[in-house]
Image (cartoon, rainbow, N blue to C red):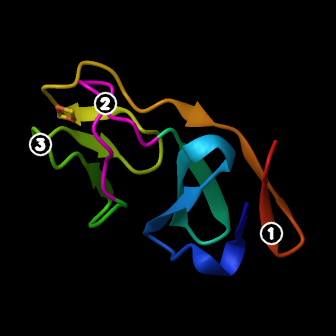
């Protein structure tokens, strides 16, 4: 899916998945990896990789917590959907 080294600490990357899907993989703290469906829960726009500890949707400005995906600022009323990932050696895989 992605190498752990490709995910910056404090940031994240969009990863292409089979079937035209994408996954937003983040590393909020060194060695802690999480992944979210990058479709904004508002009306489905693709969110940006995190910057400054938050994930932002460019369409209407919703803001999400980088660690939990929880909504910090609307118009979205719910957080990003987390997808379980695990580290396997140098790679990150779906758990
Ligand atoms: S689609 Fe993301 S804030 Fe509207």
- Image check: 90 left or right of 26? right
Q: Position of residue 28 (x, y in %)?
A: 49, 61
> Is 19 or 93 nearer to us in this picture?
19
Q: Quadrant location of residue 51?
A: bottom left
> In the image, 88: left or right of 86?
right
Badge 1: residue crowd in 10 Å (few <14, some 14–19, many ≥20): few
Which badge, 1 or 2, is on the more N-terminal residue? 2
Q: Main secondary structure of the magenta part?
A: loop
Q: Left or right of 68: which side holds 7? A: right
Looking at mark 3, is its residue's CB closer than 8 Å to ligand 1? Answer: yes
Q: Are marks 3 and 2 in contact (CB under 8 Å)?
A: no
Residue 50 coordinates in the image, percent (x, y): 35, 61
| Region in magenta | 38-48
How far separated are the C-alphas under marks 1 and 3? 32 Å
> Is the C-beta separation of discs 1 and 3 under 8 Å?
no
Specify whether tag 2 is near ligand 1 (CB below 8 Å): yes
Q: Which residue is mark 2?
A: 44
User: Residue, x 22% and y 25% (percent of image)?
Assistant: 76
Residue picked out by circle 3: 61
Image x and y of residue 46, in percent:
33, 45
Q: CA distance from mark 1 to mark 2?
A: 28 Å
Query: Dot 1 corresponds to which residue?
Result: 91
Residue 65's spot in the image, x, y percent?
35, 44
Q: Secondary structure at mark 3?
A: loop
Ligand 1 lies in which image quarter? top left
Element under disc 1: strand
Crowding at mark 2 (Cα within 10 Å: few <14, some 14-19, many 20+): few
Task: Give above or below for 53 relative to 5.
Answer: above
């Amino acid at each position: 899916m992605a190498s752990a080294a490709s995910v910056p600490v404090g940031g994240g990357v969009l990863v292409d998945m089979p079937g035209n899907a994408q996954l937003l993989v983040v590393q909020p703290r060194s060695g802690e990896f999480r992944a979210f469906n990058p479709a904004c829960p508002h009306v489905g726009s693709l969110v940006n990789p995190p910057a400054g500890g938050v994930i932002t949707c460019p369409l209407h400005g919703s803001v999400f917590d980088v660690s939990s995906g929880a909504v910090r600022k609307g118009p979205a009323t719910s957080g990003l959907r987390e997808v379980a990932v695990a580290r396997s050696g140098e790679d990150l895989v779906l758990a």
